[in-house]
Structures are given as structure tokens and as C-alpha cells.
Image: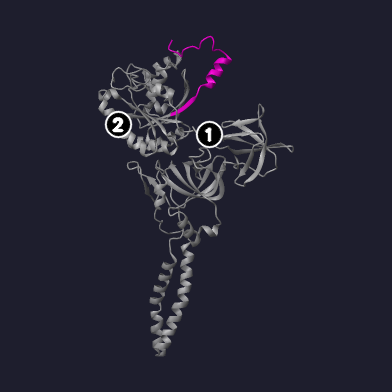
Amino acid sequence: MNVRSQPSAALTGAALITAQQEKPLLRFVACGSVDHGKSTLIGCLLYDSKQLFDDQIDALAVDSRKFGTQGEKLDFSLLLDGLAAEREQNITIDVAYRFFATAQRKFIVIDAPGHEEYTANMATGASVADLGLVLVAADGGLTRQLKRHLVILSLLGIRSVVLAVNKMDRVGWSAETYRTIEAEFREFATALGIDAIVCIPIAANSGDNVVGRSQSMPWYNGPTLLEYLEQAEPTRGSRPGPFRMSIQWVNRPSPDFRGYSGLITSGKVQVGMPVKIYPSGRSSRVARIVTFDGDLVDAAAGRSVTLTLADPVDASRGDLVAGIEQAPEIADEILTRVFWMSDAPLRPGQNYLLKLATSTATASVEPNLSVIDLDTRQLAEAASMARNEIGTCTFKLDRPIAVDRYADCKDTGSFILIDPETFDTVGMGCVERTCAPRPRWWRWSWPASWRLKRKNPDAAKPTRRSETHFRSLAKAMSWRATGSLDTFVVTFVITGSTKLAGSVAVTEIMTKVLIYYCHERIWAWVPWGKARPTHSPGLQQSLGH
């Protein structure tokens, strides 16, 4: 039988379960352009590493005769492409998750679609991955969609990538073709901040360099794909984060018990630990850590718990419980990187619901919008952000919330955008930088702009005022100077005195200049009908690479 190797008699029952639990887990996402062989590669990996039972192989043989594209051979892509539409079109539409294990470690492989129309599904799968497996067809090279996937991996903080140059049989197992693609890929990925790159030439249909070493490429001396995955140490998530728990529910079954339930997304908490509730900033200590199995002394990330505090504090769903040493930032304005998923473009002035952890706030899109050019990898000014585009955007929130930079804490630094009318998820993003909340009068005052410019020349300026005081005054004087000519002429004709006519005209100019100037300053605050301001040069640097 073509099945997994059986455990030895010494590893049975509880010992086997313990051995499996102690194995390290690697989540990796398979991405790349459509028809470059992602599903075929994953299916081949499962088959050659003997992860399939006989009934699965028999079912695969039947499906291959019915839906397959490999003639009499097994079509490994059908192991993951299970939807009827996927098999009819021979493409991946939805994200497929498969678990398998070897003697060295456990894996969760995420098979993401390569078609541009389903890029949102790829981003969803990549958001939980530790490593990116990027496929490129040797006879196709780096495509625009593959570059988009790389930018999304970079956006999500994935810094470890393995490039699998597939379909090497179609280019005659050419080492020159492989090295050309490798050099181009390394240049593009390095510019995005991806620093751990490994390249492997493979042929998924025949299994060359997938599990076993290829006899057709003697010029390649590196590891096979499975050998690399078994020893890979992704950089993402290697640094322990600060304690964070977003409150999902206030648990109060009786007057004698008040607990705050949620998932610990980062760090560790223990009984007696001082904590704060954000954004209010109220302090207390952890009295108990309650779970279904009983009280705990401490709990780490990934555990759902109910915390009771030593002091009665006002906290509700959406608030954040955090340690006092590494506090989150409290902000009502955030500079973010956004991946847009809606057919309706993202434009300044629009409002969305921003959901970050368990907190939801109304977010208004500020005018300083930019989009990443996939060819140059540079930010460019944009009036809007279309579907599947990636860029930077500043959001003004209706209230201060507790956030972290995505680089510091993934779970409290990432968010989704929801259409307030249809409640569709229209975008996802990561927090790059925050702005401390200020009084409303300060945000739009000229001292705020002057002080921000002195403190940080690249800081975002108040965006709603494009008229300067000098320009408003000059417009008022020129308007009244020309408008008072008729007053001077009419007064001179009636009185015959140039002195009296001049006095009347000057008086009219002075009074109406003041009125017009005040009128201009009021309209300068109104964003309706104004042209969008130019892009701040600081946003180009905020890409971070």
C-alpha cells in the first residue's frame, strides 16, 4: 500500500500523541500565477511523501480519468481543486488547506489561487502563513500577477520565500534559464525587503526535486523542496511579542463574577501581572485566569481565556488588555498599507468600517493616497485605488483606538475594511504609523501645521485646507479693486468730486475686503468640490524599503 509509514511499537498511544505535538509546525502558502502548477506541486508533494491512503489514490485515479489533463497519468492538482468549477476550468478558485507531517515536522500547506480575479483569496490564505512558496513556470518567467503576490507577501510581513522554478522539462532542464529567472526574482524580492530567499528547480508532473532528487538536473546541488521545508526557519514570528488580548465578551454570569473573555494573540499573561485596559488606560492586576478546564497560573498566545481583574474597571468588547511595559499606541489617525478587494475603487472622502481585532471604528479616507507600481516597486500618487491594487492610505477614525505597528504585533496591527451599506469586506491592511489623537481645533489650525513641519518635515499636513492666508487676502483685494471701479465712476458722475468718489470707493474696498477674506477662510475648511492636494513626499519613504 502507498500509505504513511507506520509508527514503531515504542511510539503508540499517548507517546505518539506527545511526539506529534512536540514537532514544530510550519504554515506555508503556495502562490504564483495561474497555470504555473501550484496545485499539481502540492499534490505531488503529498503523493511522493506517502501522505495518501489507498482509497484516496483510487479516488484520484477515477477523478483523473474524468477531469484530468495528464492523459493516463494521475492529475495531482485534483487532490486540492475539489470544487466543480475548479475542475471544469482547471484552475484554483478557493483557498485549500492541507495538513501533513513528516518525521521532522508538521505542515499546513495553503494552496492559493493564481488567477487575478481571486487575488483576495490568495491574500486571505497568506495572512496566516509563515513562509511563501512561490511558483514560476520556467517557460513563462515572472508575470505581473506573480509580482503582485510578492508585494502581498511583503505587505503581510513574510520575509522567508522559496522560489520553485517549475516545468523545467519544458525548457530542456536548462540551467541558464533557471539562473536567469533566479536573478530576476532575487532582485525584485530583495527590493521588497524579503531577505531569506531559496531557489529550487523542479518539475511537479514528474516529481523532480520535489521529494526525490532529479537525475535530469545534475548541475543543481541544493536541497529538494521537501528537504528545504523540513529545515526552514521562517523569520516571521520569531520574536516574542508583547502581551495582547482583545476583549470579545464581558462574562458576567452572576453579581459575584466579572470576567473579560478573549483570545491571547501575543505574549504571555500570569496571575498577579499588572495590566492596563486600552484605550482608557485604566490599570489593574490579573486576579484569575479562568478556562473551561480550570484556573491557570499563566497562559500564552493562542489560548482563549477569561481574565478577572483585582479592581472594578469599565471595559467592554473592543477594548484591549495589555501589559504595562510594552503599551500599544492610542491613535485616531493611522497611516496604513492597503490591499483593495472591491470593484468600487477606494477614494478620498469615503467612509468605511475599520475592524481591528475586536474593535470597530468608522474610518474616513484622507486625500494622501498612493499606489505601488508593480514594475518599479515605487509609490505613485493616485486619485483612487482600484481592485487588486496595493498602496498606502491614511485613515481618520471617529474615535481613538488601541493599535500596534504591524511590524511590532501582527494581530493588533492588521485590519479589514467593511462597506457600511453592504457589509462586504472591501479591503485589508496593516498599520505602518500612527498619529496621536489631538483636539479637533488643533488638527485644522495653522499652528498645528507649523509645529508638525518643524518637528518632522515629512509628516502629513492638515489635508482639508489648500488656501493660504496670503492667497485669500490677495484674491479679496483684487476682487474689490476691480469691483469698486463702478462705484467710483457712479459717485463721480453724481457729485462731480473725485475726492468724494475716491473716499467712497476706498471705504467700500476696505470693508468688503474684510468680509470677502472671512468668507474665503470659511470656505477653505469645506472639502466639498475641492481638488485633491498633492502627494506628500514622506509617503514615498513610508513604504519602508
* Residue 463 visible in rendering: no
* Residue 543 visible in rendering: yes
Quadrant in which the N terminus is drawn: top left
Q: Quadrant of residue 304?
A: top right
Disc marking residue 181 = 2
Disc 2 marks which amino acid?
Ile
Toward the viewer: 100 or 299?
A: 299
Q: Quadrant of residue 13?
A: top right
Question: Residue at 44% of width from left, 78% of height from top?
Answer: 509
Toward the viewer: 526 or 129?
A: 129
Disc 1 marks which amino acid?
Pro
Which residue is tagged 1?
240
Above or below: residue 328 compared with residue 73: below
Viewer-side label of 2, 1: 1
Range of residues picked out in magenta: 1-28
Q: Residues within 10 Å of mark 2 (few under 14, many from 20)?
A: many
Q: Position of residue 286 (x, y in %)?
A: 66, 37
Q: Which comes sooner in the sequence, label 2 or label 1? A: 2
Disc marking residue 465 = none
Question: Residue at 59% of width from left, 46% of height from top?
Answer: 279
Question: In the structure shown, which secondary structural element does the residue marked by tag 1 occupy?
Answer: loop
